[in-house]
Amino acid sequence: MFAGTGSDVGKSIVAAAFCRIFRQDGYRPAPFKAQNMALNSYATPEGLEIGRAQAVQAEAAGIPCHTDMNPLLLKPSSDHTSQVVLHGKPIGNKDAYDYWRPSPTPSPGPTPSPSPGGGGERIDFRQEVCAAFDRLASKYNPIVMEGAGSIAEINLKDRDLVNMSMARHAKADVILVGDIDRGGVFASVYGSIMLQTPEERKLIKGIIINKFRGDMRLFDQGRTMLEDLCGVPVLGVIPYYKDIYIDEEDSVSLEQKRRQWAEGKVNVAVVLLRHISNFTDFDTLERDPRVNLFYTNNVQDIQRADIIILPGTKATLDDLIELRRNGCAQAIVGAHRNGKTVVGICGGYQMLGVSVADPDHIEGDIASLPGLGLLPIHTTMSAEKTTQQVTFMFEGQACQGYEIHQGISDTDEPIVQSDRCIGTYIHGFLDNGAVIDFLVGMVGKVGKVGEVGEVGEVGKVGEVGRTLADFKEEQYDKLAAHVRQYVDIDRIYQILSDND
């Protein structure tokens, strides 16, 4: 298990690296995170929903993703409530206090079936996630587990499903990951270990310091001091990198994204929503050398951009109100009127329509709102969630993506186009070269369509169905090589061998 001193210390990326390393070394690894809190999710081949990080880690391991890799997903819908997705299916919304009440004592016998309607017995989430781990561990070896946030949230310890309680169930060797870039790494590592019970401290077999910048020799003394203080070996110090591209799940990474317009490029403004989801939809487009993609809710930047994208959201109606309040809705409509291209993905697609209705109050108290009126669709929110992988045709080319949405629009078309406006429920829509070339070609100010755009440094955008997969494989291999260079892999194998 890769546990953390806090959120965004790099647990997900380190776990992905080890999924690839173990695969390279001839093993059959699989990722596992008992409980994930994220708005960036993915559809499995069976049409079920898991956190994006575990889908990426499964890709690094070279295996299909499955709900047993992330049996419990929480999708925040407000500061106090989250949609609970169990084994890939939503079972309702939970208030944070109610959700974090201690689980009942596990009872012998088969795992009880969840009751989506909220009636019947309270679901034993601990039993559900442990059963998922056991199923996964019967098929793969080793299991590369990931913790969540900090392992030292002692006020939640009796309710923990994902950190040390899960490590105890799995009898896992725990490697603690600390982020030196944010400062305070000595206190966070030492404190995280010392706040564990004696039994839990025995499970912590090593420390990895992540996101180091500068001359590595300057940390030699710090490494020794940490080992003396904690009684745990420092297994590696991983330098910060900028040239490896791995899909990230945590929206904290949005803070490092570009925020401004650039001369001589096709400027693509992604409207920064409060409940933005699946922001990895734009990673491939962002890497195209013709494009400057940036995130903003500044109305001048929106009006100035060549292409405006309304992304997915967990709260369509709430974000639609916010767009009208902050002037972004008017800016988008005005920019479109002035000849700019507008694209809506999932919730953004719904907002571009004529109306969005929520008669059953799936999202909240708002019954209906007018949309921006750029697409001839009407949407009604529904309790049922659509989750599926899809293949579609665009500009004569077969393309791929996936759908995760609540709400039904009154058209059977996967993609709706109307006067320089495109809308679709398909996440991954912009991972396809035919789509990217079409959009850049509509702007028509940079390069030759189908020749200039590349995915990173690999192949033409028009070949993205093949080269995006190649590009991802190259990135996982680069990540594995980077981690191998700075982490004592032999020591990790020795720790695993001692545990056996």
Image (cartoon, rainbow, N blue to C red):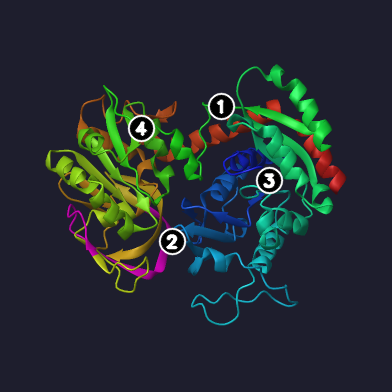
Compare marks 3 and 4 and give the one earlier in the sequence: 3
Q: What residue type is labelled 4?
A: Arg
Are there few (<14), some (14-19), or many (20+) residues within 10 Å of tag 2?
Answer: many
Q: Which amino acid does label 2 sit on?
A: Thr
- Check the image and report above or below for 387 versus 493: below
| Residue 322 makes an appearance in the image | yes
Residue that numbered label 4 is attached to:
259
Q: What residue type is labelled 3?
A: Ala
Compare marks 4 and 2 and give the one earlier in the sequence: 4
Residue that numbered label 2 is attached to:
387
Compare marks 1 and 3 and give the one earlier in the sequence: 3
The residues bearing labels 4 and 2 have C-alpha atoms spaced at a distance of 31 Å
Q: Which amino acid does label 1 sit on?
A: Tyr
Are there few (<14), some (14-19), or many (20+) residues within 10 Å of tag 4?
Answer: some
At 76% across and 59% down in the image, what residue appears?
Answer: 169
Compare marks 3 and 2 and give the one earlier in the sequence: 3
Q: Give the range drawn in magenta.
A: 369-391
Residue that numbered label 3 is attached to:
3
The percent coordinates of residue 215 (x first, y second) are 65, 17
Residue that numbered label 1 is attached to:
241
Q: In terms of secondary structure, where does tag 3 sit?
A: strand
Q: Nearer the viewer, mark 1 or mark 3?
A: 3
Q: Which of marks 1 and 2 is in front?
A: 1
Q: In terms of secondary structure, where does tag 4 sit?
A: loop
Are there few (<14), some (14-19), or many (20+) residues within 10 Å of tag 3?
Answer: many
At 71% across and 47% down in the image, what residue appears?
Answer: 1
The percent coordinates of residue 54 (x first, y second) are 57, 50
Q: Which of marks 1 and 4 is in front?
A: 4
The residues bearing labels 1 and 3 have C-alpha atoms spaced at a distance of 21 Å
- Check the image and report above or below for 67 versus 288: below
